[in-house]
Image: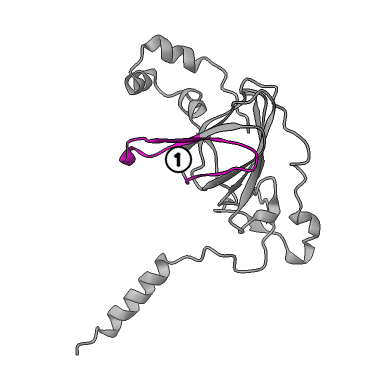
Amino acid sequence: MKFLPTSLLILALATATAFAFDPSPLQDFCVAINDPKVFVNGKFCKDQKQVTADDFLFKGFRYPGNTANPLGSKVTPAFVDQFPGLNTLGISMARIDFAPGGLNPPHTHPRGTEVLVVTEGALLVGFVTSNQLNNTLFTKVLYKGDVFVFPIGLIHFQLNIGKTPALAFAALSSQNPGVITIANAVFGSKPPISADVLTKAFQVDRKVVDYLQAQFWYDNN
């Protein structure tokens, strides 16, 4: 039986260690603090001796969000920026209020899967698969108590199809899942994407692109 040289075994072990990562916290908690002088992939930890119960409390869901806007919806996020106690825990939430006919427009969360539960009203929800799966639309009408999952990174939406306000809560598999609203990103980027790119991509007249880029793209987050 032949054995690998010791040098190769050490190299293999070092390589495996270099590419490994631990997705779980390495301590009980790491309440986030901001350091404007340093940028890191995540947040610095507050001194554990200075942590209090208030660091693990978020009161932002107590009151309805203001849906008096062009979309008729309001997302109240409880991500790590709003809720420092989430830091390193790999989870976050959001409250979504809908006026009758209100829409949470097509968007993606590049770093998190979303699980949505409806607590009031009726929502038409859906997500679109990647090009690999022919951009298939999966859609469903949800009622009070229903739960639906939107896979990480896929475009999805929620529309209140009822005549009364609706309310839903989302849990996401990242402390900072990110949000990219499709229309805002494509037609409201700063600086704007070249109209030549958009007319060719969307196969529309230049006037249509100019019109869309001239709109105010409201952000309901």
- Whether residue 63 appears in this view of the structure is yes
88 versus 65 height, above or below: below
Q: x%, y% of residue 8?
A: 28, 78
- The quadrant of the rendering that contains the N terminus is bottom left
Q: Which residue has dot 1 on it?
A: 154
Left or right: residue 42 versus residue 191 is right
Q: x%, y% of residue 55?
A: 76, 55
Going by the numbered disc 1, the residue's amino acid type is: Leu
- Whether residue 96 appears in this view of the structure is no
Which portion, as a residue range, is magenta? Answer: 126-152
Q: How is the image coloured?
A: one colour
29 versus 159 height, above or below: below
- Crowd class of label 1 (few under 14; some 14 to 19; many from 20; radius 10 Å): many
Q: Residue furthest bottom?
A: 1
Q: Residue furthest left?
A: 1
Instruction: Give the quadrant of residue 25.
Output: bottom right
Q: Residue at x 52, y 27 (%)?
A: 184
196 versus 118 height, above or below: above
Left or right: residue 69 versus residue 213 is right
- Give 19 or 109, whichever is nearer the viewer: 109
- The quadrant of the rendering that contains the C terminus is top right
12 versus 81 height, above or below: below
Q: Residue at x 38, y 71 (%)?
A: 16
Q: Is residue 207 magenta?
A: no
Tell me the SS state at disc 1: loop
Q: Is residue 150 magenta?
A: yes
Q: Residue furthest top?
A: 207
